[in-house]
Image (cartoon, rainbow, N blue to C red):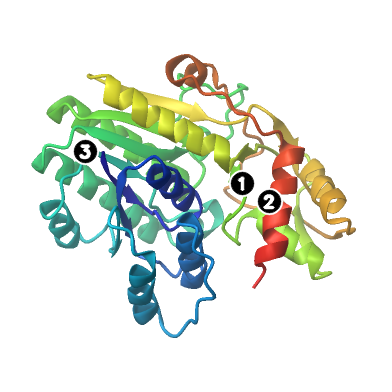
């Protein structure tokens, strides 16, 4: 099969590409190596995803991406340095490739940055996603997996969060853009019969995690003997989901779409193991064997108090079954983190 993966050099995307290539599929990776975080991290992700651990000599972004493409050297893997906001640039890729299914992971991520840059988030997460939907209908591509987010639930009072819950009250621009992508998806499913699964990811962590995310950020601060920003009283909680379990869910969503027609489904992918901020830091301390320094701060705008996934639909529909508990997942992450600090 020929898969187009957006954001294939990111945290989750590079793990997905790795598994698709191992299964013998062809992958077209569309990633713009955005400066949201250092592009060098995405290059390292990409090399890791193909088992290439060469010492990369960085120079400048454009030449480094060209060098990366040469290093990949796999006829089943293309990398396109392409922004999803650029419809014409995307169209050229669609024109020159047979695409069986799209897995759309690319986005401007993060709740707090979205409050500072709401219009950028609208451009990438809404316009960029709609560009892909439009190209699907133009090129008659009928299968689409899209990454959504647990943030769409906002401060939902009912727990665990179910796909049937009302999600009309997001509390950040990021969450609103993800809800918008879901709604637009239904439009294209209804008008053009595009089979679609939208996966609401719940706080993904593991090797290659972005450095701005709490577990990675806190690990770096702890090992550098620096203070951790501790927002609120430590009772905020997240349904942390190990990246391998998320990838298993994505692969099963792909398989479901390939076997079924007339599909429009929204599905939670989580762990159903809720960990408080206080517990998360304690687990990192124990795994790193270093005591954290805490800097107490008030709660941040846009942050939800708790996430907790009802994954019964994922289990029934996709045969999804997360296997990695938080303590083991943190151990695997820390082993990777200590090898890859730079």
Q: CA distance from mark 1 to mark 3?
A: 29 Å
Q: Is 258 located above or below residue 328 in the figure?
A: above
Q: Which mark is residue 100?
A: 3
Seen at 57% across and 56% down, the residue is 208
Q: Is 326 located above or below residue 232 in the figure?
A: above
Where residue 40 appears, as percent x and y from the top left, is 49, 72
Please tell me which of labels 1 and 2 falls first in the chain: 1
Quadrant where the image shows the C terminus: bottom right
Q: Is residue 155 left or right of residue 135?
A: right
Where residue 245 appears, as percent x and y from the top left, is 56, 35
Disc 2 designates what residue?
Answer: 333
Q: Which mark is residue 205?
A: 1
Q: Residues within 10 Å of mark 3 (few under 14, many from 20)?
A: some
Quadrant where the image shows the N terminus: top left
Please tell me which of labels 2 and 3 falls first in the chain: 3
Seen at 42% across and 56% down, the residue is 108
Query: Helix or strand or loop: what does disc 3 sit on?
Result: loop
- Closer to the eye: label 1 or 2: 2
Contact between marks 1 and 2 (CB within 8 A): the answer is: yes
Contact between marks 2 and 3 (CB within 8 A): the answer is: no
């Amino acid at each position: 099969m020929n898969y187009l993966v957006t954001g294939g050099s990111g945290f989750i995307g590079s793990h997905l590409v790795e598994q698709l290539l191992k299964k013998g599929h062809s992958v077209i990776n569309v990633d713009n190596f955005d400066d949201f975080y250092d592009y060098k991290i995405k290059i390292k992700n990409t090399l890791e995803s193909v088992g290439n651990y060469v010492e990369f000599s960085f120079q400048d972004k454009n030449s480094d991406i060209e060098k990366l493409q040469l290093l990949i050297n796999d006829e089943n893997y293309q990398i396109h340095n392409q922004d999803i906001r650029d419809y014409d640039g995307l169209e050229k890729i669609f024109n020159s490739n047979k695409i069986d299914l799209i897995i759309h992971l690319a986005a401007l991520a993060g709740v707090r940055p979205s409050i500072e840059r709401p219009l950028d988030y609208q451009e990438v997460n809404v316009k960029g996603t709609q560009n892909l939907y439009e190209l699907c209908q133009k090129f008659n591509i009928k299968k689409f997996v899209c990454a959504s987010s647990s943030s769409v639930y906002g401060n939902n009072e009912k727990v665990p969060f179910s796909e049937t819950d009302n999600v009309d009250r997001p509390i950040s621009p990021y969450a609103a853009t993800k809800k918008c992508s879901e709604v637009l998806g239904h439009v294209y499913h209804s008008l053009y019969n595009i089979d679609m699964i939208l996966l609401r990811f719940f706080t993904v962590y593991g090797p290659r995690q972005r450095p701005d995310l709490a577990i990675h950020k806190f690990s770096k601060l702890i090992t550098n003997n620096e203070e951790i920003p501790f927002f609120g009283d430590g009772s905020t909680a997240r349904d942390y989901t190990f990246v391998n379990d998320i990838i298993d869910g994505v692969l099963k969503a792909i398989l479901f779409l390939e076997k079924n027609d007339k599909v429009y489904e929204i599905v939670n992918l989580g762990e159903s193991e809720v960990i408080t901020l206080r517990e998360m830091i304690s687990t990192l301390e124990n795994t790193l064997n270093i005591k954290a320094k805490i800097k107490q701060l008030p709660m941040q705008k846009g942050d939800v108090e708790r996430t907790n996934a009802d994954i019964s639909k994922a289990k029934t529909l996709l045969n999804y079954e997360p296997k990695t508990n938080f303590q083991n997942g943190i151990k695997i992450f820390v082993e990777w983190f200590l090898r890859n600090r730079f």
